[in-house]
């Protein structure tokens, strides 16, 4: 067990070390693929708009949470245009500091900048209409991901939505030594979501991404 805990500790600390060296830019956030940002955002916007609005079972637009927010790329382009208030959580303080200038005047509608790893982060109960978790679940162990998703479920308002958007592998779990993360296949992601007591209400693949990168899938959970 000792080894496992040491491995887990280094899994997290190595990732923190990696991100500490990454430049606080859109290109840095996207591992050199800054050019895909617009394709990514427009896909996410179309996905999200299926759920937003007034009426039975719709997701409200008062408060969203951007998990693994980095410098606020998704907050700026996707969330602030649709939600009244957005909170950002990220493990790297330098990125959150940079977000304040990157978001410009719109940043006035940011509620909280929270510097914390998601494995330790407890979102406020009943606060969020949307919890957006993009390109970060690979930095959590299976058990921590399940626990975090469970906490997200408790943090939703009525009609609220958790969205995971991430790379998926073709089969099994593929480790990435460079940034100390893993890429899971869709079956594994679905089973972890189920363990967390959430259900998938919609799922789609992000199209028009470069051929050489992993497939990216978006899952809406309630």
Image: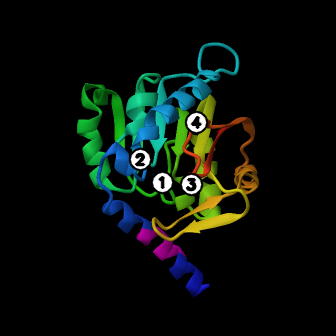
Residue under pointer 3: 137
Question: In the structure shown, which secondary structural element does the residue marked by tag 1 occupy?
Answer: loop
| Mark sitting earlier along the chain (4/3) | 3
Question: In the structure shown, which secondary structural element does the residue marked by tag 4 occupy?
Answer: loop
Could you say where residue 13 lies in the image, as x and y percent from the top left?
Answer: 42, 71
User: Which disc number belongs to residue 111?
Assistant: none
Disc 3 or disc 2, which is closer to the eye?
A: 3
| Mark sitting earlier along the chain (3/2) | 2
Disc 4 or disc 3, which is closer to the eye?
A: 4
Residue under pointer 2: 89
The magenta span reads: 8-14
Residue under pointer 1: 121
Q: Report the magenta stretch's main SS.
A: helix
Task: Kindly report the distance in space between the C-alpha atoms of the residues bearing marks 3 and 2.
Answer: 13 Å
Compared across the picture, whether 51 is left or right of 79 comes to right
| Mark sitting earlier along the chain (4/2) | 2
Could you say where residue 197 lies in the image, as x and y percent from the top left?
Answer: 73, 48
Question: In the structure shown, which secondary structural element does the residue marked by tag 2 occupy?
Answer: strand
Disc 3 or disc 1, which is closer to the eye?
A: 3
Tag 2: Cα neighbours inside 10 Å, few (<14), some, or many (≥20)? many
Task: Kindly report the distance in space between the C-alpha atoms of the residues bearing marks 2 and 1.
Answer: 8 Å
User: Which disc number belongs to residue 208?
Assistant: 4
What residue lies at 41% left-to-right and 34% top-to-bottom? 75
Question: In the structure shown, which secondary structural element does the residue marked by tag 3 occupy?
Answer: helix
What residue lies at 33% left-to-right and 58% top-to-bottom? 22
């Amino acid at each position: 067990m000792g080894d496992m805990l040491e491995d887990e500790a280094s899994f997290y600390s190595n990732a923190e070390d990696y991100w500490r060296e990454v430049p606080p830019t859109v290109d840095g956030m996207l591992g050199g693929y800054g050019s895909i940002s617009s394709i990514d955002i427009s896909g996410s916007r179309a996905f999200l708009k299926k759920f937003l609005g007034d009426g039975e079972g719709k997701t409200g637009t008062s408060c969203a949470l951007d998990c693994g927010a980095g410098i606020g790329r998704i907050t700026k382009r996707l969330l602030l245009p649709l939600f009244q208030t957005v909170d950002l959580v990220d493990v790297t303080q330098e990125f959150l500091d940079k977000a304040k200038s990157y978001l410009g005047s719109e940043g006035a509608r940011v509620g909280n900048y929270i510097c914390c790893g998601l494995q330790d982060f407890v979102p406020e109960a009943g606060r969020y209409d949307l919890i957006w978790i993009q390109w970060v679940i690979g930095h959590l162990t299976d058990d921590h991901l399940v626990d975090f998703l469970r906490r997200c479920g408790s943090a939703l308002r009525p009609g609220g939505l958790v969205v995971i958007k991430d790379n998926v592998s073709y089969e099994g779990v593929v480790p990435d030594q460079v940034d100390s993360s893993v890429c899971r296949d869709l079956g594994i992601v679905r089973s972890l979501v189920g363990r967390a007591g959430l259900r998938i209400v919609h799922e789609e693949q992000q199209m028009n991404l470069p051929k050489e990168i992993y497939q990216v899938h978006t899952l809406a959970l309630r």
